[in-house]
Amino acid sequence: MRFKFLLKPGWLALTLAVWVFAGACIYFLSPWQFGRNDERQAQNSAITKSLKSDPVPFGAQHDEWQKVELKGRYQPELEALARLRTVQGEAAFEVITPFRTTTGQTVLIDRGYVRPVNGIKPPDFAKPPADEVTVIGLARPNESNDQPAFEQDGRLQIYSINNNAVGPQIEPGYYQLIEGQAGALDTLPLPRIESGPFFSYALQWIAFGVMAVGGWLYFTIREARPGGVLHEGSRKKKKSIAELLAEESDEGADESSGEADDAGQLHGTRHVT
């Protein structure tokens, strides 16, 4: 059978590895990158739309990154610091302050960021105004709440901006202040509006999967032919050093014998003469 070699353990292992890798590339890795590209495109579209539109009042229907106008009072006694943040390539804390709206609901306001002291300690920063204010923020969803909050130096610190991490009876999501609002610190920059490399990464994963299958087919066809390059019968057995030395010795002996025969013949000829 020409394809009997496919049942060899080594070939079966190679086949399994190639097809698992190709399947992962095409059915998991490339769709993952396509999904990230779709998310980036949706984010870019929402940010662009928000920048061009007027803010909507709090309570109205809105999407992520929509500008929302809120009226009420800050509640600094429930303020929290979102830790392990990076803003413009440097470590930062984001200051999250609950805000009691005039409608009686409490929401989270991201007032901006502050830089840590000595890389770890929160600095002193301005308190929010005590009076009733009107602010405009960008609507953001809850972040995943995977680690519990804790207090350090009298300040609540959280790993994720999530209403459940700060306190009870707070509405889900939060609002990221834009520049020039009451109570704003150094406001967070908007994400860069660019497509990113995700689409090209997805195409690369598809290409890797196709190349893996193509390589497997190529070597399978080569092996199936008579005298295939991977067939055991087509391989030249490597000789040991002892075998090579023995061959050289035999060749030397043959040459010496041949020279002796030539010398004998020559001597006999001279003797006859």
Image (spheres, helix red, strand yellow):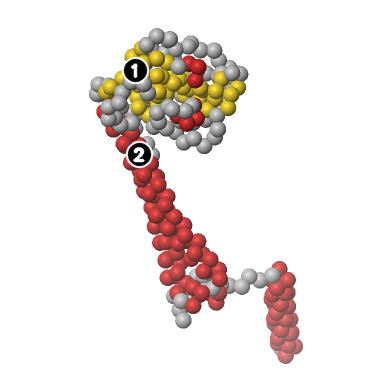
Q: Position of residue 79 (x, y in %)?
A: 49, 20
Quarter-wise, where is residue 107 in the image? top left
Q: Secondary structure at mark 2?
A: helix
Q: Position of residue 146 (x, y in %)?
A: 52, 37
In the rendered image of this protein, does residue 208 appear above or below residue 263? Answer: above
**Mark 2: few/some/many CA within 10 Å (<14, 14-19, 20+):** few
Q: Secondary structure at mark 1?
A: loop
**What's the residue type where badge 1 is placed?**
Thr
In the rendered image of this protein, does residue 9 appear above or below residue 138? Answer: below
Q: Position of residue 131 (x, y in %)?
A: 40, 9
Q: Quadrant of the C terminus?
A: bottom right
Disc 1 target residue: 102
Q: State how far apart marks 1 and 2 are (Cα).
A: 34 Å
Please give the name of the residue rendered at 55% of the width and 68% of the height, measured from the top-left corner.
10
**What's the residue type where badge 2 is placed?**
Glu
In the rendered image of this protein, does residue 171 appear above or below residue 243? Answer: above
- Upstream in the sequence, badge 1 or badge 2? 2
Label placed on residue 39 = 2
15 or 51, nearer to the observer? 51
